[in-house]
Image (spheres, helix red, strand yellow):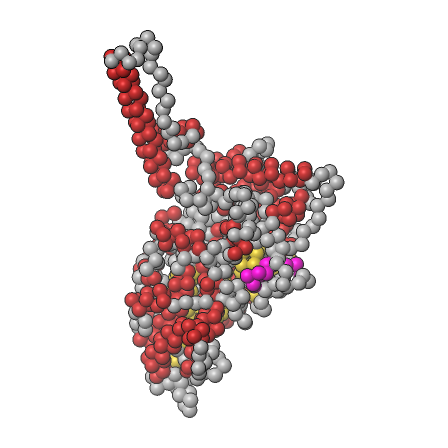
Amino acid sequence: MSTVLCPIVPTSFNKAEVFDDFFETSEGRKIRGLEDREQPKLGVPGQSCSTNLFFGFFFDGTKNNYVLAEKGLNHSNVARLYDCYPGLSVPGVLPASTDWKYKPSNYTHFFKTYIPGVSTPFKEINDSGEGFEGQQGAAMGFRGEARIVWALIQAINKVHRYFHKSPLVSAAETEKLTMSMDLTARRRRALGKKSIFPNAREKEDGKTREEFEKILRRLHGAVSQHWPDKKTGRPSKIDPGIVQTIHVSIFGFSRGATQARAFANWLTELCRLDANMARRGDTVSLGGFKLEIDFLGLFDTVASVGAGNTFGNSWLGRMFDGHGTWADSEGNLRIPEGIRCVHLVAAHEVRRSFPLDSICVGNVAPANSQEIVFPGVHSDLGCGYSPCEQGRGIDRTGSDMLARIPLLFMYKEARAAGVPLKLEFASEAAKERFQTTPAAIAALNAYLAQSPTKTGTLTAIMREQARLHIQWRMARRATGKQPIESTRSFARASTFDQNDLHSSNLEFEKEIAAFETWLAHKGKGFVPKEQAAGFNNEHESEWEEIARWWAKAPPPSSAVLNFFDEFVHDSRAWFKLIPGNPDNEAAMHSLLRKQVATLQANRERNLYLETMYRENHKALVRLGIRSKEAGAPKYQPQPLGFSELQIQALDEYARSAKIPRMLTEGREPFDIGGIAGRAGYLRFRKVYGGRDSVLISQAGEAPHRKQVA
């Protein structure tokens, strides 16, 4: 199945909470048919006691956390989908106010699990999300593995909870297991095999299997009375129901999408182990009951586990690829066979630290899967931006945010696959978080009309999207006639965001100068060639691809300008890698207060030293050591530790307590002497294709070659 660009968005997307308006008649009929399996057929002999269970798992992205998002209204799309999944939550993870309220007695066989993003608090696994844990979570996906272990145990607990109204594995025991279990590919493979005479390596690899075997034996002991008798087909105990199938759906964004993919693979292997222990034959089961993964919904998978692509293709970067430990692309990140998977990928993400992990292996998508390129940067797909952030949008509830459209697209795809999402019955707050505006839909559709490449390879689609983005950037360069600083969105942005947007635009000028110097050195006879897929962060190859159209590309249309100006965020502008450079307003206020105090202390030190200097001079004159007529030598104050521009900004902050206009730093460095590959805006996104060493290629290229979109 080839990759496709986001299709034209129907106007019905602004009516998602009204079932008959949002879904076409044929779609609605299909969904209603799938809903028949959701409730027991009361009054039907032989069927009224039969039921299915429904499990939903929602893995949030890096720095995305439902509770923390309440203040800034910057819930991720994963959190928004969680809101419209009915049923019982895991107690204590989220406030009771987030629990499902509509006819809860109808959904006692539905269970939903929310997993907060790495670099945010998750007390159930003893992750503070702050300090060292927060830094390592953001940089390396720290405690991502523990989140997957926790979710696997919750899957087991849900089966026990349905029958016994309580979890099998306690919170304390679960926390210990999240600290001790390893989820490497070797250990996952070991779930399916057990040597009679294991060697030392096999014993080590089998430790995770042994832990799960212990838990599954406990589960089987607790629920086996609900298994159907081989002769009669009826269980010895019927109440609360005769379980037929457990239907599972999984969602994830960013590193949460990476976790979701690993979770799907581990759950599949765990259920094979369970089926073997329960003697269920070739089926996959949990607690002895048949299990099916109906849907895997992914927003822009970024692994970056361990040291990611931050160092590009430098000598240091080649040592790491972001697929450390549990996130190996050859196994844990592959899409399990037969699962319906929809992967929405960001067309305009440029940060080197955010390479994409395609669901394709080489250039081939798994059967029954779709990979769809959506215009926007990483969090324009999975959300996490607050309404009006960077001046994008004017509605304080966020209904005009670009991220609402991929949310609605995923919602529609999930429901068509049988995921029991129920926006029509969700809370008013949940419904509000799904709203979009006709203006946002129209702007995206107008932009899509300027994108001729609708289908084909991921390489072809992503390169065209990158070209449109770069052309817009050139039209909005700092030295141009209509720079970013002159746009309506910039004027609406907070001073904090204006500082980042302006500073990164000035950095872009340096990048342009370096590119044009490189191009000039090529000489007048230089004819740039189309580059094969496989840049791998080699900027000269990327630049040669850009040089093919650099001088002859027409100026961007008004539709392209409007779309990027008003709806697409600048993910590079705010993303600070270097410590001491705040990426949010609260941290900036804290830093400025400290710097104002430092500046004041340094000024007071200089005043004291100058006073002492003059007093010393007077004393020397009195002693006759220095002539009064000679005058005192001019005092040379000590450096204040800040530049003149910084001092002006700090003085303004001291007067107003408001963030002043100032330059900011700390973004991915354009060039640091070969230690890391060059970052910036004149580049293409790196895309892995199913192996650590294989990047997405054009059709027909050798699968062993390193490729990139």
Residue 483's quadrant in the figure? top right
Specify the quadrant that holds the N terminus: bottom right
> Hey, which residue is sitting farthest bottom in the picture?
231
Q: Residue 382 or 703: which is nearer the viewer? A: 703
Where does the image place residue 416, in percent across and percent down from the top left? 52, 66
Which residue sits at x=67%, y=37%?
520
- Range of magenta residues: 689-699
202 is within the stretch colored magenta: no
Residue at point 44%, 55% (across, down): 140
User: Seen from this angle, which residue lies furthest right?
Assistant: 525
For this view, does 285 lie left or right of residue 565?
left
Residue 658 rendering spot, x and y as whole percentages: 37, 34
| Residue visible at 54% across and 71% down in the picture | 337
The relative height of residue 275 versus residue 456 in the rendered view (above or below) is: below
Position in image of residue 618 (x %, y %): 27, 15
- Which residue is farthest top? 629
Tell me: 117 left or right of 301.
left
Report which quarter residue 597 is drawn in. Answer: top left
**Residue 223, image quadrant:** bottom left
Image quadrant occupied by the C terminus:
bottom right
Tell me residue 160's x, y (percent). Answer: 34, 74
Task: Identify which residue is drawn at 30% across, 27% down.
Answer: 604
Residue 220 visible to the viewer: yes
Q: Is residue 699 above or below residue 671?
A: below
